[in-house]
Image (cartoon, rainbow, N blue to C red):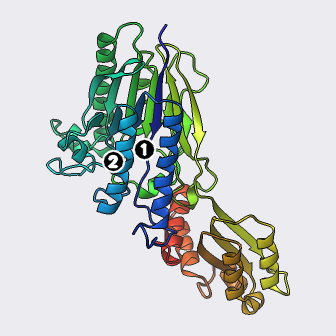
Amino acid sequence: MSEPIRVLHFADTHIGMENYGKIDSESGLSRRVQDYLRRIDEMIEHARGRDVDLVVFAGDAFRSRNPDPTQQRAFAQRIRTLAQLAPTVLLAGNHDLPVNAAKASTMDIYHTLDVPNIWVALDYELRRISTKRGDVIVGATPYPIRARLLGDVSRRGLTIAEQEAELEGILGEKLAELAHQAEALADEATPRLLTGHFSVAGAVWGSERLVMLGRDATVDLEALADPRWDYVALGHIHRHQNLTKDRSDAPPVVYCGSPERIDFGEEAEIKGFCWVELARGGTDWEFIESKARARRTLRVDCRASESPTRRTLDALKQQSLDETILRLELRLTPESDALLDESAIIAALKRAGVFHIAGIRKNVERGGRARLGRSPEGLSPLELLARYFEIRDVDAARREALLERAREIVEGTR
């Protein structure tokens, strides 16, 4: 029996997310962009050390569809290194594809220059890829652009829900056809891998909804949990998860997650990539944690303290904050707010080695009328916005996400 095919599976690098970082004068890149690039470097070293056979990038290389040329160059240097180690599949995600089909994607340059050992997967297709440990059948399902998939469908009189159902039906048909082609093309011993960039029904979302471009199409899990595949390598959702955990009748259907934390909605998530030992009917895989930049939200209650500055400084001393992106939230009364020395707190954070101060939020109690909601007097802009969302009955999860984005804007971190 041949050895398993060794596969590196990663996705959602989102290079260009520059929030919470200053520009590095030597490279011309944001220090946060450098974080994302270091995560790719970690994956390269892991792949090299374990003698990788196949690299699968499941989409979303950059933050935007028009990335900075310096960032493009940095990403291309790393992709070239990976392609020198093993055949590399670059799947197009929603942040990689232009809305206008006539325009080039951020990945097209590799195809145009015919860079060796790289397959830029822009369409729903199947290929047999030769590696040093044997052949692999790889099916590619890039992000579903609704205008392209529904181009031949008359949408006159269809509701949005009916259009969504039509789109999901088309996606299901394409996935079924790829599985059928894989079965026809492969022999009994050849492993089959499907890679896709989309949402799957039942997957747990993270804060990636905040950076999503356009409405999202959803794929039914059973369209992927097909035993004709040996591993399904997904991108798009940033939270790592195996959607077929504890199922013996289906292949692993795995979101590797993003290798770096994008915002505070992901501060508690473990980040990384997947290492796969791909074999027909017996694939093993593991999640490899990356050295993602730590994020912390530290909350200190100073309402009962006669010295709110000392209370805050003592709380900071109890934490390990070196190289952390920190958000500090202080609960104060009007009296303790007047006594607070914010400059002393900032100086202490710098001495503690904090990578970036994402904001110091002061939640000041303003008396009964404001707390009971009878008057907007004394409320901060964020508190007023929260009250507006409550009045408008905005869903709790969406309200939290919108407030998080608003907080970053108000605090000047974008």
Compared to 177, does 27 lie above or below? below
Residue 212 image offset from top left, x and y in percent: 39, 54
Q: Which residue is mark 2?
A: 94
Residue 303 image offset from top left, x and y in percent: 80, 80
Closest to the observer, 167 or 393: 167
Q: Element under label 2? A: loop
Q: Amino acid at mark 1?
A: His
Q: Which mark is residue 214?
A: none
Compared to 324, does 240 lie above or below? above
In the shown orientation, is residue 323 left or right of residue 134? right
Q: CA distance from mark 1 to mark 2?
A: 8 Å
Q: Residues within 10 Å of mark 2 (few under 14, many from 20)?
A: many
In the shown orientation, is residue 365 left or right of residue 407? right
Compared to 246, does 310 lie above or below? below
The image quarter in which residue 307 lies:
bottom right
Q: Amino acid at mark 2?
A: Asn
Residue 360 image offset from top left, x and y in percent: 63, 77
Q: Element under label 1? A: loop
Compared to 97, does 309 lie above or below? below
Q: Residue at x 47, y 42 (%)?
A: 44
Q: Residues within 10 Å of mark 1 (few under 14, many from 20)?
A: many
Q: Is residue 207 visible to us here?
A: yes
Q: Residue at x 26, y 43 (%)?
A: 146
In the shown orientation, is residue 215 left or right of residue 251? left
Q: Earlier in the sequence, mark 1 or mark 2?
A: 2
Closest to the observer, 288 or 369: 288
Closest to the observer, 369 or 239: 239
Q: Which residue is mark 1?
A: 236
